[in-house]
Amino acid sequence: MSESSKEDKMSEDKKVIRCTVCPTGCEITVENVDGEVKIRGFGCKRGEEYAKEEFSAPQRIITATMRVENGFLPIIPVRTENPIPKESVFDIIREISSIKVKAPIKVGDILIKNIHDLGINVIASRDMPIKT
């Protein structure tokens, strides 16, 4: 059974999470028992912390592309500087895809400041010179 189908079968009080902190990929079970979070199956302290956060407030770094005006290429890879709440992913991707930026762009340039008032910027992941 795949990880996503396992998670679909779990309740909000219990989830099976595949840890992504290291290559081991521990399968961690997290459950809320009478208000106390119990975690089993982690191989290290970092995995335990990852599972706890993924259970209570999952976050993701978004990687996407934005259209570029007058650039050497028509699109540029972008990412959020920090993880954003998982429930905001699709709204943020929609916003990113609706914006066109102008070249030249340097890696690390802020292309969208404070997206969705989360205090997180969307930045360029590469340089984009002007089309010659």
Image (cartoon, rainbow, N blue to C red):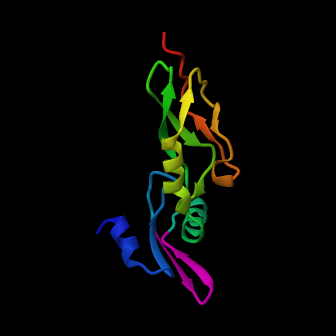
Query: Which corner quadrant of the image does residue 35 belong to?
Result: bottom right
Count of all numbered marks drawn on residues in the image:
0
Query: Which corner quadrant of the image does residue 81 belong to?
Result: top right
Residue furthest to the right in view is 119
Residue 66: x %, y % from top left = 49, 36
Residue 48: x %, y % from top left = 57, 66
**123 vs 52, nearest the viewer:** 123
**Helix, strand or loop for the magenta stretch, by majority:** strand
**123 vs 92, nearest the viewer:** 92
**Residue in the image at 60% along x and 90% along y:** 34
Which quarter of the image is occupied by the N terminus? bottom left
Residue 104: x %, y % from top left = 58, 20
**Residue in the image at 46% along x and 67% along y:** 17
**77 vs 74, nearest the viewer:** 74
**Residue in the image at 41% along x and 78% along y:** 10
Residues in magenta, as a range = 28-41
